[in-house]
Image (tube, rainbow, N blue to C red):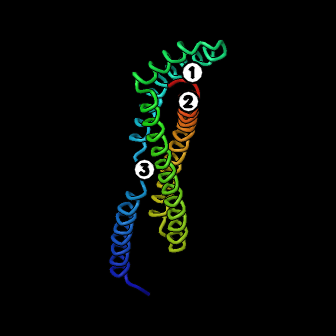
Amino acid sequence: MPSQATREITDEKEEKLSKNIRELIQKTLTAYSPPVEDFKQRVVALHDEHLEICCLAEALIQRMTLANDRQYQRAINLYGTIIKNENLIDKLNDLANRAVELDKNLSEAITRTNEAIELLAQLMDIESAYGNDEIVTFLRDQIDKFQKHHEALQELRNTLLPVKERVEGTLREIRGFRYRYWY
């Protein structure tokens, strides 16, 4: 039977080991932790910019459609010149490229977050088997944190997708007019 002094040394070693394990896990998790606020700012900025550009482009497309229906070639040419002078195709192209890149980055962050949650669940199972309640509690808190990150990232992606689709659709439509009706 171990003496009181031996148990104290063992408890001290266990406490130190738990602290080291927790610190190493925390350090490893930083590679999985997504920059949620940065993503939020980028999605909001892209959304605001898309509203301005798409509204103008869509208004001009509507006018060009009406001018085409009435066979007003000069009006079509004028609206086409406005689109050209405002660089709307380039702006829409830039928005579409940025939306695709941001969607890709969000998808990767969601994947990393899922991987972190899976890793944490595995670690929690292992530490639970060793009876290390302190680390199990820490890991459970980390899982909760990463699940919140996952939800926030998914919401941002759900906000981004309609923006991306609108920009791409508007760009396709405006290019179609460009190639068919104005010179």
Q: Marks 1 and 2: in contact by CB < 8 Å? A: yes
**Amino acid marked by disc 2:** Thr
In space, the residues marked 2 and 1 are separated at their CA atoms by: 9 Å
Farthest residue, direction bottom: 1
Give the tally of numbered discs. Answer: 3
Mark 1 and mark 3: span between their CA atoms? 39 Å
Q: Secondary structure at mark 2?
A: helix
| In front: label 1 or label 3 | 1
Question: Taking 122 as reference, is 27 left or right?
Answer: left
Q: Which mark is residue 61?
A: 1
Q: Are marks 2 and 3 in contact (CB under 8 Å)?
A: no
Between circles 2 and 1, the one closer to the viewer is 1
What is the x, y in percent for residue 138? 45, 58
**Residue at the (33%, 70%) spot, across then down:** 16
What is the C-alpha distance between the residues marked 2 and 3?
Answer: 31 Å
Q: Residue at x 37, y 57 (%)?
A: 30
Judging from the image, what secondary structure is the residue with disc 1 in? helix
Q: Which residue is mark 2?
A: 170
Farthest residue in the right direction?
A: 69
Residue 106 spot, x, y in % from top left: 48, 47
Q: Report the front residue among 166 and 155.
A: 166
- Residue type for callout 3: Pro
Q: Earlier in the sequence, mark 2 or mark 3?
A: 3
Name which residue lies at 50% across and 18% down: 77
Dot 3 corresponds to which residue?
34
| Few, some or many residues within 10 Å of mark 2 (<14, 14–19, 20+) | many
x, y (%) of residue 165? 58, 36
Label 1 with label 3: CB-CB less than 8 Å: no
User: Mark 1 vs mark 3: which is more N-terminal?
Assistant: 3
In x, y percent, where is residue 36?
43, 43
Local crowd at mark 3 within 10 Å, few (<14), some, or many (≥20)?
many
Q: Amino acid at mark 1?
A: Ile
